[in-house]
Amino acid sequence: MPDATTSPSHAAAVPYASRVNAGVSIHHPRAGEMRLRPSTDHDALFLTLSDSHVWFCLGMAGTDVPAEIAAMERLSALAAEAADQLRALHTATRERAA
């Protein structure tokens, strides 16, 4: 499995687990910072999560694209679930305050 100094395009084999180059926790996420953009250097996509340089690199040469598709579908489902739970918590908080 590649280490943090190698890029997916230089990996000898596709890893079977996500490779994280840094541990990140995003507090106060903002929709306006999230973008999907093509790479200018590679035939890949970057899903940017924050203006603080946090993103997913998708579709690089040598990657397991079906696994990345499944990961993005799972991310989408979890995001929808998180939004539903936040909405419910917000509603309950407002009702208690009323």
Image (cartoon, grey):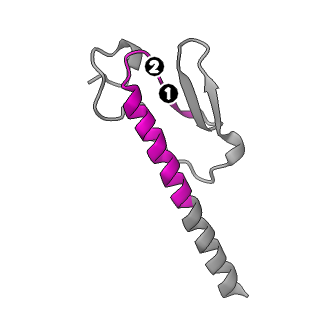
| Left or right side of 65 for 85 | right
The stretch drawn in magenta includes residue 2: no
Which x, y percent locates residue 60? 45, 19
Which of the pair 96/73 is nearer the observer? 73
For label 2, the SS is: loop
Quarter of the image holding residue 16? top left
Q: Amino acid at mark 2?
A: Met
Report if residue 20 is visible in the image: no
Q: Is residue 73 above or below residue 45?
A: below
Which x, y percent locates residue 57? 50, 27
Q: Quadrant of the C terminus?
A: bottom right
User: At 38% across and 22% down in the image, what residue appears?
Assistant: 63
The numbered disc on residue 57 is: 1
10 Å crowding of disc 1: few (<14), some (14-19), many (20+): some
Which x, y percent locates residue 71? 42, 40
Which of the pair 92/4 is nearer the observer? 92
Quarter of the image holding residue 41? top right
Q: Amino acid at mark 1?
A: Cys
Q: Is residue 65 above or below residue 43?
A: below
Which of the pair 28/45 is nearer the observer? 45
| Left or right side of 57 for 31 | right
For label 1, the SS is: strand
Q: Quadrant of the N terminus?
A: top left
Q: Are marks 1 and 2 in contact (CB under 8 Å)?
A: yes
The stretch drawn in magenta includes residue 61: yes
Decide whether the magenta segment is chiefly helix, strand or loop: helix
The numbered disc on residue 38 is: none
User: At 57% across and 64% down in the image, what residue appears?
Assistant: 84
Residue stretch rendered in magenta on the structure: 54-82
Which x, y percent locates residue 45? 55, 25
Q: Which residue is mark 2?
A: 60
